[in-house]
């Protein structure tokens, strides 16, 4: 889906902003903030924003097709239609958004409607609302804040309830009728399901989970560089660094090393540049990338340095 430049304005440029995010600056108004995790087609997010113009709403979603469709409703191409000024979009993995971008005690309510239940046993590790993630949600909620999750899957509902002890929440559960008119709710209705499972987590004790801080990214100098002698061994420990390829341009005297860096819940593709500068070679992150400056990125740069030395 092609969008006009103006329609991209609700997207939060999180790679270029100081973190944790300042909601007052992002929304250009001071108001309570609610966050929907995995907003799908944006039906609930946008309806909440329309019904509550004195509140701010942030939606988190990783899939661009869903983000684009929602942006098209926030700021339609038809300028005669009203625009929603109290909605912002974070195109980001939810765990990373809470872990690195959203500040402690800065959100009134979290919502998640019909999240993927990852039904296969081999996919259990991908389920989002684990005990650790519930603690992370708790830490980002204001005192007495709440998190509401609704699912069609009884087994996922039971699993989430099993994750709830020692997360700083009191838990209320109930079976509800359809009421959100989202794509997935309609799908299950069409397939004959007319009862869904709701869990509300009400914060009654704060669980402290600090916001992950960015680090200063390293760079190095090399007296010489031989691309034929470059030998990178993949690194697998608390941080995993895998080299995908190295491209060397002899005319420009420049190498580009493509790496995948995985640490905790974050996986990033980065490129390290090695290029001639005067009487030495500079080794640093290539320009024009979007990335989180982490210990894993620094480890990757160090490994490239050792492979190039």
Image: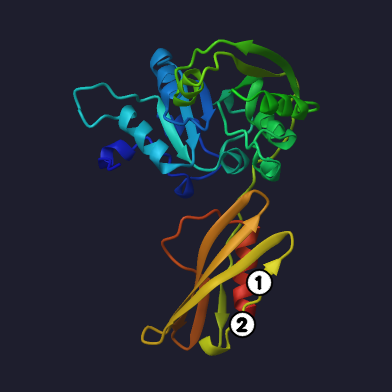
Cα–Cα span, label 1 and label 2: 10 Å
Relative to 235, 182 lies left or right: left
Question: For the view shown, which residue lies furthest in the right direction?
Answer: 166
Q: Position of residue 109 (x, y in %)?
A: 58, 21
Relative to 274, 85 lies left or right: left
Q: Position of residue 175 (x, y in %)?
A: 64, 12
Q: Are marks 1 and 2 in contact (CB under 8 Å)?
A: no
Q: Position of residue 289 (x, y in %)?
A: 45, 60
Residue 258 in view, yes or no: yes
Relative to 128, 184 lies left or right: left
Which label belongs to residue 135?
A: none
> As rendered, which of 124 and 82 lies closer to the eye?
124
Q: Secondary structure at mark 1?
A: loop
Residue 226 in view, yes or no: no
**In this figure, which residue is indicated by the disc labeled 1?**
234
Q: Please report the residue visible at 66 percent of the width from the left and 71 percent of the height from the top.
A: 234
Among the 4 quarters of the image, the one containing residue 26: top left
Q: Position of residue 77 (x, y in %)?
A: 22, 32
Compared to residue 176, the image places residue 146 above or below, namely below
Total number of numbered labels?
2
Relative to 81, 40 lies left or right: right
Q: How crowded is the residue under tag 1: few (<14 C-alpha within 10 Å), some, or many (20+)?
A: some
Quadrant in which the N terminus appears = top left
Among the 4 quarters of the image, the one containing residue 122: top right
Q: Secondary structure at mark 2?
A: loop
**In this figure, which residue is indicated by the disc labeled 2?**
231
Compared to residue 93, the image places residue 146 above or below, namely above
Q: How crowded is the residue under tag 2: few (<14 C-alpha within 10 Å), some, or many (20+)?
A: few
Q: Please report the residue visible at 42 percent of the width from the left and 32 percent of the height from the top.
A: 88
């Amino acid at each position: 889906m092609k969008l006009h430049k103006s329609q991209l304005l609700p997207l939060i440029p999180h790679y270029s902003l100081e973190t944790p995010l300042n909601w007052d600056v992002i929304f250009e108004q001071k108001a309570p903030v609610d966050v929907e995790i995995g907003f799908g087609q944006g039906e609930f997010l946008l309806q909440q924003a329309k019904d509550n113009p004195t509140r701010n709403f942030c939606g988190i979603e990783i899939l661009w097709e869903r983000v684009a469709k929602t942006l098209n409703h926030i700021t339609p191409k038809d300028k005669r239609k009203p625009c929603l000024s109290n909605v912002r979009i974070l195109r980001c993995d939810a765990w990373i958004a809470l872990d690195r971008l959203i500040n402690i005690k800065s959100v009134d309510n979290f919502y998640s409607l019909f999240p993927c239940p990852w039904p296969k046993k081999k996919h259990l590790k991908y389920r989002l609302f684990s005990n650790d993630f519930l603690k992370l949600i708790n830490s980002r909620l204001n005192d007495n804040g709440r998190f509401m999750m609704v699912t069609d899957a009884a087994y996922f509902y039971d699993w989430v309830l099993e994750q709830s002890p020692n997360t700083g929440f009191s838990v209320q559960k109930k079976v509800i009728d359809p009421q959100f008119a989202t794509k997935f709710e309609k799908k299950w209705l069409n397939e004959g399901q007319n009862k869904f499972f709701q869990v509300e987590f009400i914060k009654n004790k704060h669980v402290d989970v600090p916001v992950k801080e960015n680090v200063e990214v390293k760079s190095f100098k090399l007296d010489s560089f031989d691309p034929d002698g470059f030998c990178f061994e993949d690194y697998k420990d608390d941080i995993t660094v895998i080299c995908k390829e190295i491209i060397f341009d002899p005319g420009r005297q420049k190498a580009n090393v493509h790496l995948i860096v995985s640490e905790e819940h974050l996986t990033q593709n980065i490129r390290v540049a090695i290029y001639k500068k005067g009487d030495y070679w500079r080794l640093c992150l290539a320009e024009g990338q979007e990335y989180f400056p982490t210990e894993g990125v620094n480890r990757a740069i160090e490994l490239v340095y050792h492979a190039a030395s």
